[in-house]
Amino acid sequence: MEQTYEVFYDETADFLEVFIGSPTKSYAEEIEQGIFIRRDENTKEIKSVGIFSFKKRAIVLKKILEKVNLEFPLQVSI
């Protein structure tokens, strides 16, 4: 089954969040300062990645997704 993504970007706050798959009950954890992941409460699957100061750290999204074997189907250029 093909993975689905939804992207939210707040330009004023420079915050980007990528939602992965269907929404489920989840919890958030800060893995680095200003970088959050949400995990499914039952499966521990990553359900979203949120990044503050995104323009300065766009490469972080790619690295996180690579770690969990997910490919983002778009190129991000700032």
Image (cartoon, rainbow, N blue to C red):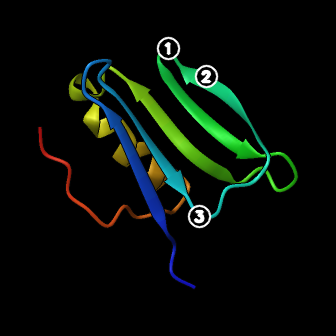
Residue 11: percent from left, percent from top: 25, 27
Q: Nearer the viewer, mark 3 or mark 2?
A: 3
Give the numbered dot on residue 41.
none
Mark identifier at residue 21: 3
Kind of residue at disc 3: Gly
Res 14 quadrant in image: top left
Question: Is 32 placed above or below 36 here?
Answer: above
Q: Are marks 1 and 2 in contact (CB under 8 Å)?
A: yes
Q: CA distance from mark 3 to mark 1?
A: 25 Å
The x, y position of residue 55, in whole percent, is 21, 27
Label 1 sits on residue: 33
Residue with the mark numbered 2: 30
Q: Nearer the viewer, mark 3 or mark 1?
A: 3
Q: Residue at x 64, y 50 (%)?
A: 46
Mark 3, secondary structure of its residue: loop
User: Residue lying furthest left in this view?
Assistant: 78
Residue at the (28%, 38%) spot, across then down: 59
Element at label 2: strand
Q: Residue at the spot x=82%, y=56% of the render?
A: 43
Which quarter of the figure is the C terminus placed in? top left
Amino acid at the residue labelled 1: Gln
Q: 68 above or below 64?
A: below
**Quadrant housing residue 30:** top right
Quadrant of the frame with the N terminus: bottom right
Task: Please tell me how crowded label 2 is: few (under 14), some (14-19), or many (20+) other residues with Cα within 10 Å.
Answer: few
In the rendered structure, the answer to whether residue 26 lies left or right of residue 9 reads right
